[in-house]
Amino acid sequence: MSRPILIVGAGLSGAVMAERIANDLDRPVTVIDKRNHIGGNCWSEIDSETGIECHKYGSHIFHTSNREVWEYISRFTEWNTYQHRVWTSYQGRIYSMPINLQTINSYYGLNLTPEEAKAFIQAEAAKENITEPRNLEEKAISLIGRPLYEAFIRGYTLKQWEKDPRELDPSIITRLPVRYNYNNRYFNDTWEGIPLHGYAKMFERMLSHPNITVQLNTDWFDIRDSISPDTLVIYTGPIDQFFDYRFGRLEWRTVDFTIERHNCADYQGASVINSADPETPYTRIHEFKHYHPEREDTGKTVIYREYSRFAGEGDEPYYPVSTEINKNIYNKYKILEYENDNIIFSGRLWLYRYLDMDVSIKENIIKIRLLKNKLYEK
Ligand code: FAD
Ligand code: UDP
């Protein structure tokens, strides 16, 4: 195959594919990104005033139970031993999140054992008699009962999505486990950590192959008419934009961060504290220094307060909004993918799906493996 290869998007999807094409297929490949940096939403950079590494698009914690993914990505970085733990603030008190025995006992002022707590919560959930949960609210109540739902889920979800939880897909809440012990780890995966030298270094290493050329500040929509027709294009941008929004725009949630620097060693005592109170306008506070406990402490800290809202034109798309209307629009675009079978499509913006990093890596490793098999007819 001598066709030029162009990847649109230098996020995790584009970077994995570029790396695989350069190393495994031994083919030259150009990667463009409209932003002024590689790494997409996983990008991190050092805050010049405090020396603390901040995740520019919100906290990113790598976690996986897939050995192939772990071994693959560990070729580009070492890891620290960080394990994610989140707390949530509700009416002036702090509770464990996801909901565990500490959350249950503290909220109800009880001292239940695991077995007792399970029976207690099941009895709370049974009060509403939900057999087949049709939406996020019903799903949450069927898992934890109404009081815990009203305290820890409803307010946060309203702020996060600006939709009634009864309009949202139940799958959103099943990302969070419910535990009847004091395990307060956010993720259950075998491997977890933050790149020891940061995400930026990890991406630089992935893309630093002589076969790879990276062009930043380059938008696909500005160059698409000028590329040579035999180019194999791999597109990881938004699906609706690719088709010039002909069926309308897909809704996204975006987030705004306000950045505060404080002259104290520790502002909140944890990397993430959520706010469950509906009257508090932000959803959570990230304090990035906690992601690198192994680094020297400068006695300063930087926090990002996160505010969620609907994305307008020009805003960064963060979370797809899982409603029937959006699913219908998405399906109309998705059919057009088959009419463009000379282009490879990938990534969270194309799939209109929340994809953890490990899933993104796996999908793109597999995509290039299939391409290789096709090229060499294995
Ligand atoms: P992106 O990272 O979005 O990259 C796409 C790239 O394409 C961008 O750089 C964009 O600029 C570029 N692009 C788009 N259109 C064009 C165009 N027209 N021309 C040129 N370039 C273009 N996963 C975890 O495993 N752990 C976490 O803790 C975690 N936290 C997250 C927190 C948030 C708030 C979000 C939204 C996601 C989180 N994720 C997390 C998921 C993770 O961000 C994704 O798995 C990952 O970003 C997917 O990479 P991608 O390349 O598909 O998309
Ligand atoms: N959620 C909640 N309260 C919390 C944390 C999460 O109600 O304290 C709900 C909310 O609807 C959110 C979903 O659970 O959208 C998934 O949470 P997760 O932490 O996985 O979301 P992310 O970190 O990706 O924003």
Image (cartoon, rainbow, N blue to C red):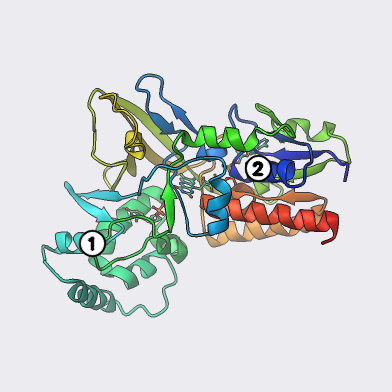
Query: Residue drawn at (30%, 49%), measured in percent from left and top?
Result: 86
Residue under label 2: 14
Q: Is residue 105 left or right of residue 84?
A: left
Q: Badge 1 local density, few (<14 within 10 Å), some, or many (20+)?
A: few
Amino acid at circle 1: Tyr
Asked whether the viewer can see residue 276, the reply is no
Q: CA distance from mark 1 to mark 2?
A: 39 Å
Q: Is mark 2 within 8 Å of ligand 1?
A: yes
Q: Is mark 1 within 8 Å of ligand 2?
A: no
Compare residues 62 and 302 and report the one nearer the observer. Answer: 62
Q: Position of residue 173 (x, y in %)?
A: 40, 61
Q: Is residue 68 above or below residue 57?
A: below
Res. 190 mark: none
Asked whether the viewer can see residue 155, the reply is yes
Query: Residue drawn at (57%, 59%), measured in percent from left and top?
Result: 325
Q: Position of residue 140 (x, y in %)?
A: 35, 66
Q: Residue furthest top?
A: 49
Q: Position of residue 313 (x, y in %)?
A: 58, 36
Compare residues 41 and 363 and report the one nearer the observer. Answer: 363
Q: Is residue 177 above or below residue 282?
A: below
Query: Residue drawn at (16%, 71%), measured in percent from left and top?
Result: 113
Amino acid at circle 2: Gly
Q: Is residue 250 left or right of residue 234?
A: left
Query: Residue drawn at (52%, 59%), measured in percent from left and top?
Result: 66
**Which quadrant contains ligand 2?**
bottom left
Residue under label 1: 182
Comes first in the chain, label 1 or label 2: 2
Q: Is residue 63 left or right of residue 338?
A: left
In the rendered image, which quarter contains the C terminus? bottom right
Q: Secondary structure at mark 1?
A: loop
Q: Secondary structure at mark 2?
A: helix
Q: Position of residue 231 (x, y in %)?
A: 84, 40
